[in-house]
Image (spheres, rainbow, N blue to C red):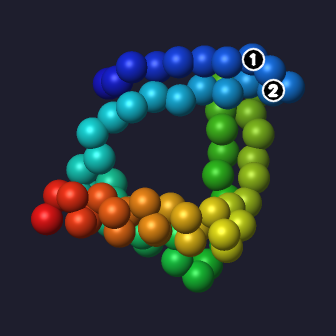
Amino acid sequence: SGDRESNVSRGIYEWFDILLTDAMATNLRRVCGDAETKVRCRGDTYYEDFTLTKDQKKNINIILDYYDLITG
């Protein structure tokens, strides 16, 4: 669980803060590898699929690198 916020502006945006576990970080690194990564955002009525770009995956891995630095 975590704090959740929403915003509607040219689309619907929603985000929340959670504590990242080691297992979550490992899974994020796995899905941000060389293979194609598809993401599904699902709501009560609709859903949207998109594919992570190489730059998006690179940025996720950079964030995980910083996470590793601060958590030791």
Identity of the residue furthest to the bottom in this view: 34
Q: For the residue carrying disc 1, how many other residues have a C-alpha within 10 Å: few (<14), some (14-19), or many (20+)?
A: few
Question: Residue at the location (64% across, 52% down)?
Answer: 39
Q: What quarter of the picture does the N terminus occupy?
A: top left
**Label 2 belongs to which residue?**
11
- Where does residue 59 sit, x and y in percent of width and height? 55, 64
User: Could you tell me if the residues under marks 1 and 2 are in contact, i.e. CB atoms within 8 Å?
Assistant: yes
Secondary structure state at the residue bearing disc 1: strand
Return the mark for residue 69.
none
Q: Where's residue 46, x and y in %?
A: 77, 26
Camera sees residue 4: yes
Please state the horizontal and vertical placement of residue 35, each as a whole percent of the image. Answer: 61, 78
Residue 31 seen in this snapshot:
no
Left or right of 38, for residue 46: right
Disc 2 residue type? Gly
Q: Nearer the viewer, residue 65 or 13?
A: 65
Name the quadrant containing residue 11.
top right
Name above or below for residue 59 compared with residue 8: below
At horizontal 27% and vertical 39% (from top left) the residue drawn is 19
| Local SS, label 2 | loop
- Front residue of 35/59: it is 59
Circle 1: residue type: Val
CA neighbours of label 2 inside 10 A, class few (<14), some (14 to 19), many (20+): few
| Direction right: furthest residue | 10
Q: CA distance from mark 1 to mark 2?
A: 6 Å
Question: Which residue corresponds to mark 1?
Answer: 8
Which quadrant: the C terminus? Answer: bottom left
